[in-house]
Amino acid sequence: MSDNMKKGLFVTVCVFLITIIYMLTAVGVYLTVQSIRYKNKVYPNTFLNGKEISGYDYNKLEKDLENIEVDNSITIYYNEEKIEAKYKDIGIVIDSKKTVEQLKNNLNDLPARHKAWLLLKTKKYSAKYIFKIDEDKFKNYLNSIKEKYDSDEVPERFERDDSYNVKYIPGTSSHYLDVDKTIEEIKNNGIEKDTIKLVVNSGTITNHKEYESIDTKVGSFVTEFNPYISRATNLRTALNYIDGAIIQPGEDFSFYKYAGPYGKKGYVFYYEFVGNGVCQIATTTYNAALLAGLEIKQRYQHEYMVPYVEGGLDATVASYSSGYYVDMSFKNTYKYPIYISAYYIGGKAYVDIWSNSNAKEGKTYETESVKIGPTSYAAYLKIYKDGQLIERKHLGNSWYKIKQD
């Protein structure tokens, strides 16, 4: 290569480099000028919630955002309950100040190359609204939620329908919406993914799952009484005391434990005895237990025969100021708990024993009273399996005195 050619190549390279330097300088100056120009304005190719806001003055943008009513939907969770609502209906609005501040800071803090891309419109920048709550409006909305969904604790219970069938209802815990805490958390953490999880304080309650097995009336007995005399008050009182008794497998039911002593609240003085008439409910319960096939632990006969059951099938109870008492009791020999439903309809007293449909293991029971003397009776319990008599169990003999006129 000749010297002239070398000189020409050198000059060409120098011119090229100078041109490049000039162009870079020009671009740099342009970008610097534009950066200064957009210090208080939105960069080109910038979008806020999908809308282009290029060149917007930040102060004007903030004012315009204050007038925008957002129609977004939001899901609010009260524990597992889902509530759908609209931002505008519950007081969620655009936080125009924070939205603009964050947008301005993010754009101004972009690297120079990113700003160049925006200025040259080769790439775009997208931002989202920042939301806040209109505290008064949102608080009113939360109070309406609280009124609708808050609940007090409801203990587990057995309900008796119009046909006097019994059903176990599990208890439910209390739930209380903490309005102030919910607002505080939203103010601190914001709203994410269009959902709000309310701060709900819930209590705890213990349910007895085994009570769910109680689904069948396994024994029932009814006796009649005159509802218009004082004695009826004592019958009704005793029924109320034993109603709802629950006996676990292997446990004993004591009539005295639930209904005694027979001078407590509800009982009245009738003839010479306090609580006279309670024995009829003890007798009704005794016969219901026999028909349920339960093991009788204690049973005492009356001194004189009673008119409401056959001889040998009565059960007397009594309590004294000394603390001594005469009881009627039976044992729950089932694998399942027992529930006693005791009530009256007019002049009839009912005692129903409820447990599981498999509790009696396919057996049915029938009582029998056999007169063995002028005032004496033998009582039996007939036990059937698949409709066949398999046992005739002697319950005992009862001897009654004859009332003197």
Image (spheres, rainbow, N blue to C red):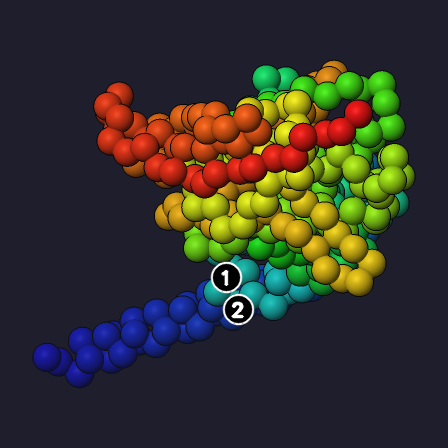
Asked which quadrant contains residue 31, the reply is bottom right
Q: Count residues near mark 1 (Cα–Cα under 10 Å), then give few for <14, some for 14-19, many for 20+.
A: some
Residue at horizontal 32%, vertical 32%? Answer: 392
Q: Residue furthest left?
A: 1
Q: Position of residue 163 (x, y in %)?
A: 59, 17
Left or right side of 371 for 364: left
Residue at (50%, 61%) from the top-left corner? 114
Residue 146 locus on image (x, y percent): 77, 42
Asked whether residue 129 appears in the rendered view, the answer is no
| Quarter that holds the C terminus | top right
* SS at circle 1: helix
Real-space Cα distance between discs 1 and 2? Answer: 5 Å
Amino acid on which the number 2 mark rests in the picture: Pro
Residues marked 1 and 2 touching at CB (< 8 Å): yes
Q: Nearer the viewer, residue 36 or 346?
A: 346
Nearer to me, 158 or 311: 311
Quick one: 387 or 187, which is closer to the camera? 387
Residue beneath disc 1: 114
How many marks on residues? 2
Q: Is residue 179 visible?
A: yes
- The residue that label 2 is drawn on is 111
Look at the image and tell me in which quarter the N terminus lies: bottom left
Q: Which mark is residue 31?
A: none
Q: Residue placed at 76% from the left, 58% from the top? A: 181
Farthest residue, direction bottom: 3
Residue under the image location 25 percent in, 74 percent down: 8
Label 2 environment density (alpha carbons within 10 Å; few <14, some 14–19, many ≥20): few
